[in-house]
Image: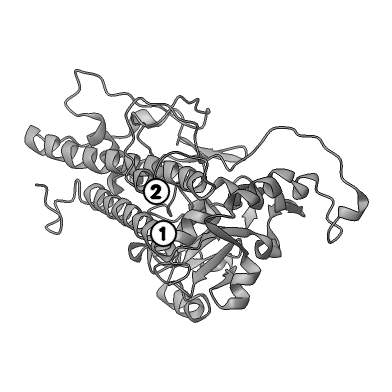
Amino acid sequence: MHEGTYLIGSVAMITAFDGPMLYQHHLAKFSVQSSSPIGPYFLLCAMESPEIHAQVRARQFSTDIIDSVVGRLEEVVIPIPRDPKRVKAVEKEARAAVLGRAELRECLSFVAKHVDLWLRQETSHSLEQILDWVPVIGERRPPALLGGRIGFRAGSLSAAAIRNDVLLPRYYDDWITQVANDYAVRCDLVSVAELKARGAVAWQTGDEIGRLNYGSGEIPFVRTSDFGSWELKREAKQGVSQDVHSIWTERQDVAAGDVLLVRDGTYLVGTSVLVHQLDLPLVYCGGIIKIRAIDRGYLPPGLLFILLNTPFVRRQIRNKQFTRNVIDTIGQRLDEIVLPIPRDPAVRRLISASIAQMLAVRSKLRHDLHHLTVNLFGHSEKHKLS
């Protein structure tokens, strides 16, 4: 990223599981030539290291309403170890982490879609086959991370069908009604409001802590822009001090197994992450809702998370999204969202355990990759390459 604000200097690796794609002008593409003494995975680690980030930030300047490092990236110096064995060791470890995470991302995307189909009895795959699925490099599938947006649709509705004076056409999406009937054999359809009334879940919004607290420390202040694919980004764009965290921690009380869901935004509304122990501690902003599974025998965290990411639920969230002032939100309509909860306790446990395991491994690989980049040029004794 060579134009923007907080994201300048951020990098990503394109793997065989990505694409086809186009990229915008704010991004710069780097390709490692065959004659280079380093490979692409070493370059990725180097560009993510504190030493390179500091150089990029030092060259950042404002152009009109946006910041940029265009024309200055060539000035950045990348230290290259003289020992080729060290370069190869970095390449090996980084490659394993990057490709492992990319593969798990594809697995989660596949599972979210096909568990939904299995619950509706619209697939010949067994649940075990879905949960054990492994992606094949080069096999193209429709992306599952684009928010469930659909094209133009037209229809009619009688005035008597209008609910709560809501005049959004997509609020009355007949596809939701049609699909809901398909879950009857394997699931109970339960609204979030009903789950709250039963004591199965609880949810609350975050807090706006004030800009003066930004940058006061290193505890992440999570905002909607810190949501990545199936997880929080490793480094939040803003951090707060331990004192600030202490002020809010009793109210927010974020714990491993909680789900954070984007309430306010545009494209990100409905995006969610399952909080892992490695994500803590944190404070989250007012544009985010924390959902906690209280009755984990009935609705364990992994199951709650994957149900929120099924096409059926994502489309409900998109349909109920509305514009408030200059931003979109789902507001209090989260209570109206209906989840298809499997009746069989063994099915609930199996799905939840599989999802939690995938996310835990992905978090561990992200954590390992972070330590590799942080210590790449610092020769830390806390992290040694195999």
> Tag 1, which secondary structure?
helix
Is 190 drawn above or below residue 14 in the view shown?
below
Colour logic: one colour
**Tally of marks:** 2
In the picture, measured across the screen, residue 128 lies left or right of residue 146, that is left
Is 82 drawn above or below residue 6 in the view shown?
above
Is 37 drawn above or below residue 111 in the view shown?
above
Q: Residue at x 40, y 75 (%)?
A: 242
The amino acid type found where label 1 is placed reads Val
Residue 335 or residue 125, whichever sits in front: 125
Q: Return the residue at label 2.
A: 127
| Mark nearer the N terminus (2 vs 1) | 2
In the picture, measured across the screen, residue 94 lies left or right of residue 250, that is left
Q: Residue at x 18, y 36 (%)?
A: 91
Q: Residue at x 63, y 77 (%)?
A: 197
Work out how far the residue at label 2 is from the one at label 1, CA to CA, in angstroms. Answer: 9 Å
Numbered mark located on residue 132 in the image = none
Residue 194 or residue 103, whichever sits in front: 194
Numbered mark located on residue 347 in the image = 1
Instruction: Report whether residue 335 is seen.
Output: yes
The amino acid type found where label 2 is placed reads Leu
> Tag 2, which secondary structure?
helix
Task: Sort mark 2 into few (<14), some (14-19) or many (20+) by Cα contacts within 10 Å.
Answer: some
Label 2–label 1 contact, CB within 8 A: yes
Instruction: From the top left corner, tell me how far across and down residue 196 is, in percent.
Output: 60, 74
Image quarter for residue 31? Answer: top left
